[in-house]
Image (spheres, rainbow, N blue to C red):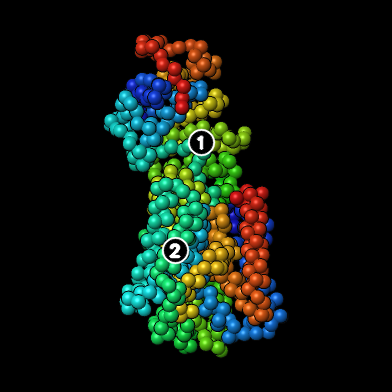
Amino acid sequence: MAENLLRLRGVSKTFGPVRALDNVSLDLNAGEVLALLGDNGAGKSTLVKILAGVHAPDAGSIMFRNVPVTIASPAAARALGIATVYQDLALCDNLDVVANLFLGREQARVLLSEEAMERQAWTLLRQLSAKIPSVRIPVASLSGGQRQTVAIARSLVGEPAVVILDEPTAALGVAQTAEVLGLIRRLRDRGHGVLLITHNMSDMQQVADRAVVLRLGRNNGVFDVARTTHEQIVAAITGATTEPATVRTATAPRATATEE
Amino acid sequence: MIQDAATAPIDLRDERLVRGLLARLRGGDTGQLPVVAGLLIICVIFQSLNGSFLSSANLVNLATECAAVGIISLGIVLVLLVGEIDLSVGSMSGLASAILGVGLTRYGWPLPVTLLVALAAGAVVGVVYGAIFVRFGVPSFVITLAGLLALLGMQLQLLGANGSINIPFSSGIVRFTQQSFVVRPLSYVLMAVVAGAYLVAQLARIRRRRTHGLSTGSPLVPVAKAGALLVALQAGCWYLNQDRGVSAPFVLLVGLVVALHIALTRTRWGRSVYAVGGSVEAARRAGIRVDRVYLSVFLLCGLLAALGGLLSAGRLATASISSGVGDTNLNAIAAAVIGGTSLFGGRGGAYSALLGIVVIQSISSGLTLLNLASSTRFMITGGVLMVAVIVDSLSRRSRAAHGRA
């Protein structure tokens, strides 16, 4: 049994009159890709932001490596070992790949240790079998897939246990999507726990081991991807089926849960 | 030389790498080539119009004239790098010169104290700008436009009714800016040390890259470059020494440029300056304290503007209501842009201040030699600035077209 990295129990979050997350539970193990699925407004982004330290949950518990934690800030999340790659990547186009990878945690005595950082950049990119022609060109010259690769590689610089990817293939073409999916598999093989937020059923079926479905802020099933059909998961996302466990807990009158 | 993938240095194993100067230029990666080319054209034109343009005497003057505004321009480079602007550097330099005049003559402060007070005033003004910028998010051009007026008011207030204070010729600052030249033998030694330091730094870099398994290129290249640098510096030095020699303020300017270049390219602070200029949001998420970067940049800009004001007051041996007004502001900003620092943030470097001010002073000096009125001078400088900004925008567009924006 792989080590449990993240265990969420009963996590809730309310924004004014909107209950974005209601009693959500989730488990993420080392060496697995867990897809987080749900329609718009299902609460995926809110959950990510709670794990990334952007929002604090109103209720519920978060265990990291079986220890209860509170994630107070993005820096605290990173220090704990939870790295998040947002959809907009947040790269500095004018800086080269090395500078972007080590941005905010450059290695330096008085002067920057450029050579050490460059070598580590190559080592990291090789481990990910990433196709980057040069680490000394501005990130602006890279393709969408390469930029995504740099953003993911950057999240690995602090050797995090958990990597959260928010819609990593949303803006990519066919070949680049395949490249990033390969990268996600290598993250799993490296022993990271990967939480993959996606809309794309094909991506999910290609790389995810398990899938957690959220619907209107609540859990709506956990599926073993290999043994589940596409239709079953779509049904859970759209609400055509409702998981028995969710029915039992859903006794309170439901608030209109739309996200942001 | 063809290396197979397994033995090639780790950074050269991709066959898609584009090498070669021409390919890079076509991609809009022009660097400082346009300004160097422009400078050569300017020299050829003025030399053919007036034979004394490239004379030792004129070049000595030119170098000395560069110092004050060049140093102010260095501060402008910094604020442009984070994508902001300081429009009040002229007024700040004027205020610093007023503090110098008043401190020395009315209050009888010793020179070092007066200099420190003036520099501190520059730093404080910069910090105030920075604080207003990060606290209230007011666009920097509005803050500094307001500052321009306020500082001008303070300058007039300090100078009082006369509007002009003469600084004694015996004062150290006047002697430094007007009559200090590097002693001839020392100047050659200095140039040799510079070339030597360059060589040592480059060889050390090659050694570090080799220990980390990265490509190095031939060690003969830096040796050849250092040799060429040595010959060029010694020749330039010899030529200036035919007249009064290498002026101390110019050495100060070049020293500051080199120091700032190292700080910008080789320190964490410098990296964060470029990061903020490239994408504030990315820098913030990477854990960079963006507020501190802005504060430090505005502080340095104010400090450098004050230093430039002190030098220009010393050179004129006077502090007056016209110090820092007129074209100081525009020249400092124009020099940074002409030298290749982008108005859009994140691109450029310390050397652009030096190159830009040399271009501006060459034009000014050449036109003066031709006995042209300042009206013509303004128009021509304006035209050159426009060309520089067009080159900036074109290379930006070309970078975008080649995916390098």
Q: CA distance from mark 2 to mark 1?
A: 50 Å
Q: Position of residue B81 (x, y in %)?
A: 51, 57
Q: Amino acid at mark 2?
A: Gly
Rendered image quadrant of residue B162: bottom left
As displayed, is residue B38 above or below residue B294? below
Q: Nearer the viewer, residue A166 or B161?
A: B161
Residue highlighted by disc 1: A87
Q: Position of residue B399 (x, y in %)?
A: 63, 52
Residue at screen point 41% across, 19% down: A218
Host chain of mark 2: B
User: Relative to residue A214, is residue B317 depicted above or below?
Assistant: below
Classify mark 2: helix, strand or loop.
Answer: helix
Against B201, is B85 above or below?
A: above
Residue A260 seen anywhere in this rendered image of the structure: yes
Residue that numbered label 2 is attached to: B153
A206 left or right, relative to B376: left
At 58% from the left edge and 62% from the top edge, which residue is drawn? B337
Report the number of numbered marks.
2
Where does the image place residue A185, in percent across and percent down from the top left? Answer: 49, 34
Q: Residue at x 56, y 32 (%)?
A: A170
* Coordinates of residue A33 in the picture (x, y in percent): 45, 29
Crowding at mark 2 (Cα within 10 Å: few <14, some 14-19, many 20+)? some
Name the side, left or right, on which A38 lies relative to B29. left
